[in-house]
Image: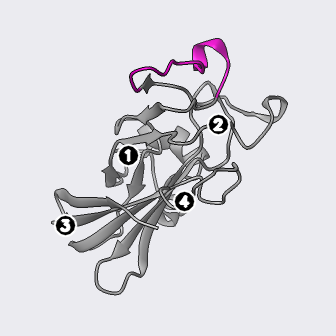
Amino acid sequence: MSMYNLRCAAEENCLASSAYRADVRDYDNRVLLRFPQRVKNQGTSDFLPSRPRYSWEWHSCHQHYHSMDEFSHYDLLDASSHRKVAEGHKASFCLEDTSCDYGYYRRYACTAHTQGLSPGCYDTYNADIDCQWIDITDVKPGNYILKVSVNPSYLVPESDYSNNIVRCDIRYTGHHAYASGCTISP
């Protein structure tokens, strides 16, 4: 994707450090490892933003509020050494009940200017939204592990943090990425 189309993401520091060099131009392209994310509140209490509503941050480029600085963190690890080769993050674009299990009901919706995740409900981020990726422009082809951590700094109290990390095997050819073996891990 061109840097011109990534200017909002650049404002939110969603790109690799090489994207911020002085010689990078609007027509230069970045390679993005895009993936969807679906988070479920499996607890018994609401998952609420780490910051109170009056301190939510307005992002003029995206035209929405962020209620958390980092809802999720993404690491791309070398499959052999487990060394971090790239990373990304997702601020809470809009923490809401996208869908719920049978018997549970949506209570949070960004259109109502409320943010949260009710028990038994899911918040879904499609792969096509800003910062729902890792910038892999500088990553060589090879085998990797994608590590997705929700509430990575433990700013929101939970009854169980052991289900907040998912790891997937990634095979990157230089042109395509293939994911397999995704599992929840502590």
Q: Nearer the viewer, mark 4 or mark 3?
A: 3
Three-letter residue code for mark 4: Tyr
Vertical placement of 127 versus 61: above or below?
Answer: below
Q: Kindly identify the residue that appears in the image at 55 percent across and 33 percent down.
A: 119
Vertical placement of 32 versus 22: above or below?
Answer: above
Three-letter residue code for mark 2: Ser
Q: Earlier in the sequence, mark 4 or mark 3?
A: 4
Q: Nearer the viewer, mark 2 or mark 1?
A: 2
Residues drawn in magenta: 101-115
- Residue at the outermost bottom position: 81
Give the alpha-carbon distance from disc 1 to disc 4, as whole Å: 14 Å
Residue picked out by circle 2: 45
Asked if residue 59 lies in the magenta stretch, the reply is no
Count the numbered circles shown: 4
Asked if residue 104 lies in the magenta stretch, the reply is yes
Q: Earlier in the sequence, mark 4 or mark 2?
A: 4
Give the alpha-carbon distance from disc 4 to disc 3, as whole Å: 27 Å
Give the alpha-carbon distance from disc 4 to disc 2, as whole Å: 40 Å
Vertical placement of 175 versus 5: above or below?
Answer: below
Q: Position of residue 1 (x, y in %)?
A: 33, 45
Residue picked out by circle 1: 27
Three-letter residue code for mark 1: Tyr
Residue picked out by circle 3: 171
Q: Position of residue 107 (x, y in %)?
A: 59, 18
Q: Kindly identify the residue that appears in the image at 54 percent across and 59 percent down.
A: 20
Q: Kindly identify the residue that appears in the image at 51 percent across and 18 percent down.
A: 105
Residue picked out by circle 4: 20
Q: Earlier in the sequence, mark 3 or mark 2?
A: 2
Q: Nearer the viewer, mark 1 or mark 3?
A: 3
Q: What secondary structure predominates along the stretch shown in magenta?
A: loop
Q: Earlier in the sequence, mark 1 or mark 3?
A: 1
